[in-house]
Image (spheres, rainbow, N blue to C red):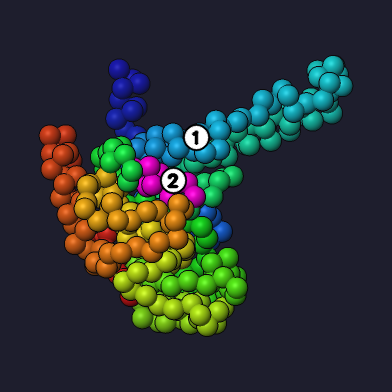
Amino acid sequence: MAAAEARKRRPKGHFAAGRAKRPRGGGRQLEAGMRGILITCNMNERKCVGEAYSLLGEYGDLLYGPEQFSDPEERLSGSEKEEDEDDVEAALRKEVGQIRASTEQKLRRFQSVESGANNVVFIRTRGIEPENLVHHILKDMHATKKKKTRVILRMLPISGTCKAFMEDMKKYTETFFEPWFKAPNKGTFQIVYKARNNSHMSREEVIKELAGIVGSLNPENKVDLNNPQYTIVVEIIKNVCCLSVVKDYVLFRKYNLQEVVKSNKDDTQQNPSSLTEDQNLKVVNPETEEEEKSSKEVNQENKNQGEIEADPKENDALTV
């Protein structure tokens, strides 16, 4: 009785300090310098992360082999293993080695981090090329028409990130764009821009400056909104700018996993750029229409599970 009364008398905030709600990313935040995959979903972020791990793990193992984890004991030399455990220095060295090995084990190939926006999941990657992995996934789904996810909408590789301020973006992209656009490399391109939880960046200014940088790398680089060879993806979340340059953006339905598995008569006339250099033949439509359609279909499938319908405009993207 006394213990029960003592618990009742505890202040309301007694447990609050020790049991504060953890961020969805487990304390890890999206920040400049990270590479990975940005995924939009339909309100069910927890399920989205699960689907992402499953899908990325499946194709990651196919492309890069099973993920390897180091054994802490194997990191210790034979002499260190044989030293007396009572030796303080030897014990300390062993403990440090185990901590380092444990830390390496936690640096997984795919790791979810807090994106900073609703309906958006960011999977940080290590030891892989995000654009190659995502292109391979979409290419396979496009060919087989086999649906593999329920709540994931779009899956965009993020090859580089920087601070979302114009001067930082200009300085970063001057180098970032070189593999695709610096002479003798060249190509037609479009820019797709989306900002979330950010009000200080101007869409028009960003597109103008980035297009100017691409042009300065090689005057033969030209804007093409109908048949772009490359699509420059600019995703800004709070103060982080996520960038990538992707191929087959139109063919793969703007990298929408719900749409890419649908049959379309134009598919027989197009081939992924990894196989041929043929350009896409279909005009880009506004993102809103396609995302809204996919979002409604996902909601319909998930109605029986009591999932909440998302506002499709949350995932809008704008095309120059």
Along the line of sight, which residue is nearer the eye, 44 or 282? 282
Q: Which residues are magenta?
A: 132-141
Q: Separation of disc 1 and disc 2 at Cα?
A: 10 Å
Residue type beneath disc 1: Leu
Is residue 200 shown to the viewer in this render?
no
Helix, strand or loop at label 1? It is helix
**Dot 2, crowdedness within 10 Å: few (<14), some or many (≥20)?**
some
Q: Position of residue 120 (x, y in %)?
A: 34, 52
Residue 209 lies in magenta, yes or no? no
Along the line of sight, which residue is nearer the eye, 234 or 26? 234
Q: Position of residue 148 (x, y in %)?
A: 30, 37
Q: Which numbered dot is residue 274?
A: none
Cβ atoms under marks 1 and 2 closer than 8 Å: yes
Q: Which numbered dot is residue 136?
A: 2
Residue type beneath disc 2: His
Residue 138 lies in magenta, yes or no? yes
Q: Which numbered dot is residue 62?
A: 1
Q: Position of residue 37 (x, y in %)?
A: 44, 51
